[in-house]
Image: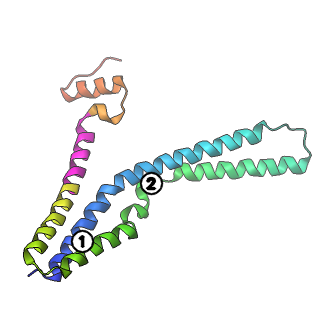
Amino acid sequence: MVNQQNLLQVYKQLIKAIVKNDRRSKIIQRANEISKEISLLSYQKINLLRQPSNEDTKAKLSKLRSVQEIDSKINKLKAEDPKCDKNMLYISNSMKTDIREDMKAILIKENDRQINRKLNNFIDIAAFLNNQREYDELIERYNLGSRGLTQDEVVKRTANKVGLDVPL
């Protein structure tokens, strides 16, 4: 018979694997969002600065304040580091609920053989997610072409691996 402690351990393993696997894509997505926001704010700033300057002093002051607010927002966004965001360490409640419901369905079943098979499936899923994440990290670390490096940087790093220096 499967006890609840084993079920809880499998649940925790699965949640940890999902969080670790999703973190990287969330960081990339947030970095892209920040880039888009900075571009939009820069565009707004340029439009404000392009407006004709034959306005009264109140209008000029409000325009100056608006430009300063936009600059402060841009600086704030540039200083933001998605890797330090604690929200990346959590899983959505809807996904947790789905996993919990699947686990409860396992407990309701009476056949121990089916329960053990489903638990093993959850363990396999967690192991697959962990292995896939490690594989992606290794590919990124050792495959120079996948990083988006320029041709000169790839040549320089490749030569450096065998102890050579590329002339400038």
Q: Residue at x 29, y 75 (%)?
A: 101
Q: Which mark is residue 82?
A: 2
* Residue 24: image tag: none
Q: Is residue 61 above or below residue 139?
A: below
Query: Is residue 134 rendered magenta in the image?
Result: yes
Kindly indicate the quadrant of the structure image that contains residue 107. Answer: bottom left
Q: CA distance from mark 1 to mark 2?
A: 25 Å
Can you say whether 103 is above or below 132 in the image? below
Magenta span: predominant SS is helix
Image quarter (top left, top right, bottom left or bottom right) of the N terminus: bottom left
Amino acid marked by disc 1: Lys
Q: Which residue is mark 1?
A: 12
Q: Mark 2: few, some, or many residues within 10 Å (few <14, many ≥20)?
A: some
> In the image as oriented, which residue stretches furthest toward the top?
167
| Figure coloring | rainbow
Mark closer to the chain start, 1 or 2? 1
Residue 61 in picture, x, y percent from top left: 83, 50
Magenta-tinted stretch:
130-143
What residue is at 86 percent from the left and 38 percent from the top? Answer: 53
Question: x, y percentage for residue 121?
Answer: 15, 64
Q: Quadrant of the C terminus?
A: top left
To which quarter of the image does residue 85 belong? bottom left
Tag 1: Cα neighbours inside 10 Å, few (<14), some, or many (≥20)?
few
Q: Point out residue 30 in the picture as x, y percentages from the top left corner.
A: 46, 52
Quarter of the image holding residue 43?
top right
Q: Is residue 64 magenta?
A: no
Q: Secondary structure at mark 2?
A: helix
Amino acid tagged 2: Pro
